[in-house]
Amino acid sequence: MLTKNIRSFLLLPIALTYNSSYAVSAQEQVQLCLIQQQLDTIERLVTRAKTANTAEPDVRYRFDYPRLSQDIQRIRQGVQGYLSPSRAQPRDPSELVGEYRLDTPSAEPSP
């Protein structure tokens, strides 16, 4: 983890130089890079929680880890798209889902 942080900070000046033509302040660039690092951490925690999840088969609700992962990817793409836009066209206006509870179907049929 330490080497990843060091590598990120070493690559930051290159990223700042590369994106200097785009109107992103250095402070904002640093903050958005930190957000991307935090998203990496959150993804690792989600993966760990998903593998450690031992939900009982008869529970009614469970956490929707795949949907959370999709939302994290969407946030990451939005930040990356802002830092290095490919073109000046409108972005996809769809919103994050934000609802992470799944209904688990019951094992026995309803009367």
Image (spheres, grey):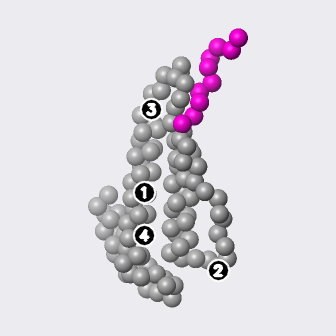
The region drawn magenta spans 101-111
| Residue with the mark numbered 1 | 40
Please state, as top left, top right, bottom left or bottom right, where the C terminus lies in the image: top right
Whether pointer 4 and pointer 3 mark residues with C-beta atoms closer than 8 Å, the reply is no
Residue 65, given in percent of the width and then of the height, sits at 52, 41
Residue at horizontal 33 percent and vertical 72 percent from the top = 9
| Residue with the mark numbered 4 | 32
Mark nearer the N terminus (1 vs 2): 1
Please state, as top left, top right, bottom left or bottom right, where the N terminus lies in the image: bottom left
Q: Which residue is the extreme one toward the left? A: 2
Count neighbours of disc 3 (C-alpha within 10 A) and say few if under 14, some if 14 to 19, many if 20 or more: few
Mark nearer the N terminus (4 vs 3): 4
| Residue with the mark numbered 2 | 88
Real-space CA distance between mark 3 and mark 2, rounded to the nearest whole angstrom: 43 Å
Q: Which mark is residue 109?
A: none
Residue 28, given in percent of the width and then of the height, sits at 40, 76
Count neighbours of disc 4 (C-alpha within 10 A) and say few if under 14, some if 14 to 19, many if 20 or more: some
| Residue with the mark numbered 3 | 53
User: Is residue 26 on the magenta stretch?
Assistant: no
* The one of 88 and 9 positioned closer to us in this rendering: 88
Q: Viewer-nearest of labels 4 and 3?
A: 4
Real-space CA distance between mark 4 and mark 3, rounded to the nearest whole angstrom: 31 Å
Residue 38 to residue 59: above or below: below
Real-space CA distance between mark 1 and mark 2, rounded to the nearest whole angstrom: 27 Å
